[in-house]
């Protein structure tokens, strides 16, 4: 055996005393060489029989092989390498039959052929006219005789040595016939060889059994237990051993058991079974129209050693070997399996052929960058699986509240699996959804207190990340609370929020000098879609103090105590810069103005001209510019949210005389 690893098909030459002989396909089958058609992993296997044409045979016991193996260098030149081997110390049975990929060969010891003499002597005497004579026994008792040279022109090869005679034939030759032996088609050639001078007769039978099938799990090869053409009727058959091997090497029983091979006798047959994917074979996968296909192929050897025992006590032992490539058809390999558990998607993508790598995973159109959530699993049968685990609360998972406490989680998963080395890609796409019941949104309740409104948000257990509590556009976080002066207290199931009146987020209604209503609203949003599910709004009555409200419709409401000015001015005498803008309400000490931001002339409120120069009172409303619409175009004011205001009293011109 020579194995050559090369991209291009290597070439072989046999070397003997007379020179170099290039081994063509034709010459190979005539001369006992095989360039195997079974090529896996870039290996080409070359086999030579001991009795191949250019082998040096010394006394039928030392065999010397010499070859040149030529491998392409990829640039049109061939690199030649000499390979030689010398084999000796082999033990031979009387009859060695080999059914190779491209020929059948039988090596018979002359000793035992003498014993066969009696069977065909009569016929031989009648027809033997030359030194060598071959008689092919054909169906219906028909005999076709020819000389050695005639046989050679027909593609047969007959050679003799001191002790052996070797016949070789290609398959499907003219004189071969296919017999059914226990239901199995068997190709048979029966030849008698006559040695005129010694009256030696050799009968040679070679047989090859054709059968092979696949039943979804097992590759099966049925071989007749007794190859009847090889066994005469008057002899007793005794089996010595039956074994199988892989790629020319016989396996001992423990090894073949470990690999799961089975060898069962029954109904006149030996049934050889090889489980899909067994060690020693090859799995190959490919992608056809985005469907995985896989095949398994194994190069098997079958060997049966048996004896024929004759009445006179003599016996003849035969070693019958056959090689066969067994392969499965292309099998569809749909991967898949999905399990969802309570709080995570668990996808098990199984039955992935071994020559496939997981290249990428896209979930909801985002590439999963880390392999943390994916674990490869090896199956006993050599295939693989990938386990993907994604908690429902992973940011990549889509969720939708279907109402009634039911939340739907969904992922759209696209696995890219690539067969190496040929890099055929297969995409496995699936949408997985899971429902969680009792996923009710948090319960929000509110109470009025002296200084503000107190909210209580009670969260049901497992739905912590489903919902977002928000104040307008903003999610309610500790930072937001700190910025705005809310008091947030958080424990495992409940969040309580105190919102002091006049802090950001309130809206106001019905403001008068004694009371007003403050309204504060919490929104409950779907934390993924930000779609508002519910809102809880609380309206509480508060006592009016000095305050300033800048509402979203552009109304400024100011309650202030101008008595602190000097000289004091009666509240009823106060107006805005536009003197027609009078207080909406006034009592002994305080005034309430309510006006549109774009009315009443000016942003500055004036009390009296004299006082104005001494004390200046500034009322300002701030609105985020981005939230203000059409302020100056048509003198309508609209803002998305209330603004916030400030009132500042500046003591100015201190120490200077007032000027008029
Ligand atoms: C390999 O084993 C896995 C897990 O037992 C099974 O799902 C799969 O169908 C098997 N594949 C083949 C080709 O037998
Ligand atoms: C899966 O991903 C591959 C490669 O990105 C793309 O070609 C294929 O269309 C995707 N399949 C689906 C169903 O989205
Ligand atoms: C309150 O606590 C819960 C769980 O302890 C947490 O999920 C949530 O984010 C916290 N909320 C705030 C506003 O800090
Ligand atoms: C002030 O407003 C409160 C609440 O709307 C109302 O009950 C009260 O009567 C009002 N007082 C005056 C003087 O208008």
Image: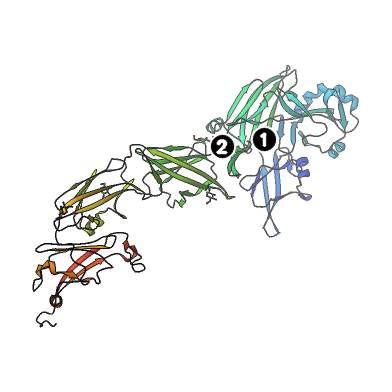
The answer to which quarter of the image holds residue 565 is bottom left
Q: Are marks 1 and 2 in contact (CB under 8 Å)?
A: no
The x and y percentages for residue 226 are: 69, 23
Residue 324: image tag: 1
* Up/down of 277 relative to 112, above or below: below
Q: Is residue 92 visible?
A: no
Chief secondary structure of the magenta portion? loop
The x and y percentages for residue 518 are: 21, 53
Q: Nearer the viewer, residue 606 or 44?
A: 606
Ligand 1 within 8 angstroms of badge 2 C-beta = yes
Q: Identify the residue at image location x=67%, y=21%.
A: 268
Residue 283 relative to residue 408: left or right: right
Task: Say which element carries label 2.
Answer: loop
User: CA separation, marks 1 and 2?
Assistant: 17 Å
Q: Which residue is mark 2?
A: 277
Quarter occupied by the C terminus: bottom left
Span of residues in magenta: 509-516
Q: Is residue 529 visible?
A: yes
């Amino acid at each position: 055996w020579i194995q050559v690893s090369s991209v291009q098909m290597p070439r072989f030459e046999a070397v003997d005393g007379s020179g170099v002989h290039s081994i063509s396909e034709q010459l190979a089958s005539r001369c006992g060489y095989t360039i195997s058609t079974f090529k896996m992993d870039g290996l080409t296997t070359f086999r030579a029989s001991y009795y191949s044409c250019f082998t040096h045979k010394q006394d039928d016991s030392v065999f010397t092989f010499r070859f040149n193996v030529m491998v392409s260098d990829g640039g049109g030149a061939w690199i030649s390498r000499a390979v030689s081997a010398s084999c000796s110390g082999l033990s031979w049975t009387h009859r060695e039959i080999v059914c190779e990929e491209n020929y059948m060969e039988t090596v018979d010891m002359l000793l035992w052929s003498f014993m066969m003499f009696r069977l065909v002597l009569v016929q031989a005497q009648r027809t033997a006219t030359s030194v060598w004579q071959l008689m092919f026994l054909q169906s219906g008792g028909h005999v076709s005789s020819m000389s050695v040279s005639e046989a050679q022109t027909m593609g047969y090869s007959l050679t003799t040595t001191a002790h052996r005679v070797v016949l070789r034939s290609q398959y499907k030759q003219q004189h071969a016939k296919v017999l059914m032996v226990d239901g199995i088609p068997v190709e048979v050639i029966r030849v008698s060889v006559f040695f005129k001078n010694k009256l030696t007769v050799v009968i040679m039978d070679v047989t090859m059994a054709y059968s092979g099938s696949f039943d979804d799990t097992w590759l099966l090869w049925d071989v007749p237990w007794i190859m009847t053409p090889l066994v005469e009727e008057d002899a007793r058959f005794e089996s010595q051993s039956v074994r199988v091997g892989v790629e020319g090497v016989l396996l001992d029983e423990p090894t073949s058991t470990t690999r799961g091979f089975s060898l069962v006798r029954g109904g006149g047959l030996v049934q050889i079974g090889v489980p899909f994917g067994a060690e020693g074979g090859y799995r190959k996968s490919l992608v056809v129209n985005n469907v995985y296909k896989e095949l398994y192929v194994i190069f098997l050897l079958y060997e049966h050693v048996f004896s024929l025992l004759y009445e006179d006590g003599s016996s003849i032992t035969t070693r019958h070997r056959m090689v066969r490539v067994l392969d499965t058809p292309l099998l569809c390999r749909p991967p898949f399996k999905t399990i969802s558990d309570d709080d995570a998607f668990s996808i098990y993508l199984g039955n992935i052929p071994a020559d496939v790598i997981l290249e990428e995973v896209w979930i909801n159109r985002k590439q999963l960058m880390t392999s943390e959530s994916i674990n490869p699993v090896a199956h006993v049968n050599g295939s693989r699986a990938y386990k993907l685990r994604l908690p429902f609360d992973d940011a990549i998972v889509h969720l939708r509240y279907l109402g009634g406490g039911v939340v739907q989680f969904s992922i759209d998963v696209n696995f890219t699996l690539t067969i190496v080395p040929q890099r055929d890609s297969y995409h496995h796409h699936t949408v997985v959804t899971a429902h969680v019941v009792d996923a009710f949104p948090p319960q929000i309740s509110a109470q009025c207190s002296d200084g503000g409104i107190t909210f209580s948000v009670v969260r049901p257990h497992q739905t912590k990340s489903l919902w977002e509590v928000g104040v307008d556009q903003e999610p309610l976080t500790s930072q937001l609370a700190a910025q705005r002066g809310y008091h947030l207290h958080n424990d495992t199931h409940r969040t309580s929020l105190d919102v002091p009146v006049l802090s950001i987020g309130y809206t106001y209604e019905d403001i008068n000098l004694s009371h007003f209503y403050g309204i504060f609203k919490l929104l409950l949003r779907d934390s993924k879609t930000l779609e508002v599910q519910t809102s809880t709004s609380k309206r509480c009555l508060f006592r009016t103090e000095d305050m300033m409200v800048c509402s979203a419709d552009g109304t400024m409401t100011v309650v202030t105590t101008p008595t602190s000015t000097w000289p004091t001015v009666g509240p009823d005498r106060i107006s805005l810069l536009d003197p027609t803008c009078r207080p909406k309400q006034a009592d002994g000490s305080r005034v309430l103005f309510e006006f549109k931001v774009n009315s009443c002339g000016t942003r500055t409120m004036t009390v009296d001209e004299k006082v104005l120069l001494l004390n200046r009172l500034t009322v300002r409303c701030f609105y985020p510019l981005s939230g203000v619409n059409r302020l100056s175009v048509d003198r309508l004011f609209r803002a998305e949210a209330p603004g916030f205001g400030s009132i500042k009293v500046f003591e100015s011109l201190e120490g200077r005389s007032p000027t008029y």
